[in-house]
Amino acid sequence: MDLFKLDGRVAVVTGGNGGIGLEMARGLAAAGATPVLVGRNRDKGKNAVAALKADGFDALFFEADVTSESECRKLVASIVEKCGGVDILINNAGIAIRKTPEDYSEADWKDVIDTNLSSAFYLSQAVFDSMKARGGGKIINIASILAVFGAPFSVAYSASKGGLVQFTRALATAWASSNIQVNAILPGWIDTDLTVSARSEVAGLAQHVIDRTPAKRWGRPEELAGPVVFLASSASDFVTGASLTVDGGFSVQA
Ligand code: NAI
């Protein structure tokens, strides 16, 4: 359906070299976009590009640490130079440091906030001119259901993801007049490297998720592809400032 076509669009996906990011990139590529994967690990990036190319998609990898404002600016300038501009930005890079609040160091707190929240601001700011020049764009922030729920091991993570949802709403109001739609996706529990470590660190988590989720299973990274294509495409041109939960019903279970 034309509404969902992304032909000719340049889609930047941070943390796109693995997990949810790579599967969203694959979905965007299948809809016609050129995914530009951003990450810190060059080998992982090369492998991700090779995997997409093996499936017949064009893709590029740029190495960057998105916690640095200056690196974000340089990154976007390089992408604009190489690809001509940016149409879609997926702020997906994220980390979790699981400790009780009393054990959190200042460095832990800053690491999580800088990676999950500040990076989204730096990159959004950096792509603004290019999106505006191209007549509009789409920014999609990957938050979490922990933007809404609390968990004893996730104070910084929850704060960063809650902040990302509010950032999404505020940015949406600021840039609607430039035809830039800004939305958030709140994934539930998805089976990736991030949650492999969560399952080993948090006793009982694996079964708790299955018991509470009406779908009775963990989510798969590729199940984020459809939602991201919707929010990246013309199908969502009047949707902005919204949060789309993708959690198999976890958050509506009484
Ligand atoms: P992942 O660990 O597989 O992917 C995260 C990616 O972010 C990695 O490729 C990592 O290298 C990259 N990254 C981290 N710090 C970076 C930095 N400073 N600069 C550049 N890249 C950086 O984890 P997953 O599960 O794919 O997570 C993707 C996003 O989805 C994260 O924002 C996470 O918080 C969010 N999320 C994941 C859920 C899950 O159950 N897996 C649930 C809710 C949200």
Image (spheres, grey):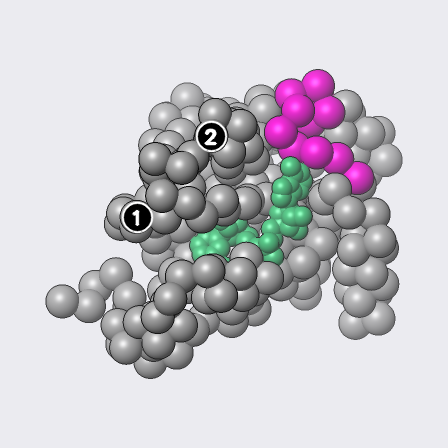
Measuring 84% from the left and 71% from the top, which residue is drawn there? 54
**Within 8 Å: ligand 1 and the Cβ of disc 2?**
no
Kind of residue at badge 1? Pro
Residue 79 falls in which quadrant of the image? top right
Seen as rendered, the residue at the extreme bottom is 216
Residue that carries the numbered disc 1 in the rendered image: 152
Question: What residue is shown at x 59% (from left), y 44% (from top)?
Answer: 93
Give the image location of residue 127, x and y in percent.
64, 27
* Mark toward the start of the polypeptide (1 vs 2): 2
Looking at the rendered structure, the kind of residue marked 2 is: Ser
**What is the CA distance from the residue labelled 1 to the residue labelled 2?**
16 Å
Residues 117 and 26: in front is 117
Residue 152 is left or right of residue 114, and the answer is left
Above-or-below relation of 230 to 121: below
* SS at mark 1 in the image: loop
Quadrant location, the C terminus: bottom left
Above or below, 1 relative to 242 = below
Measuring from the top left, give residue 183's x and y in whole percent: 43, 42
Residue range highlighted in magenta: 63-73
Q: Nearer the viewer, residue 241 or 105?
A: 105
Q: Residue at x 78, y 55 (%)?
A: 44
Look at the numbered disc 2 and give the secondary structure of its residue. loop
What is the quadrant of the N terminus in the image?
A: bottom right
Image quadrant in which you'd find residue 162 = top left
Please give the residue where the numbered disc 2 appears in the rendered image.
105
**Residue 165 painted magenta:** no
Q: Residue 68: horizontal and vertical position, in percent? A: 66, 24
Q: Is residue 102 visible?
A: yes
Mark 2 Cα shell of 10 Å, populated few (<14), some (14-19), many (≥20): few
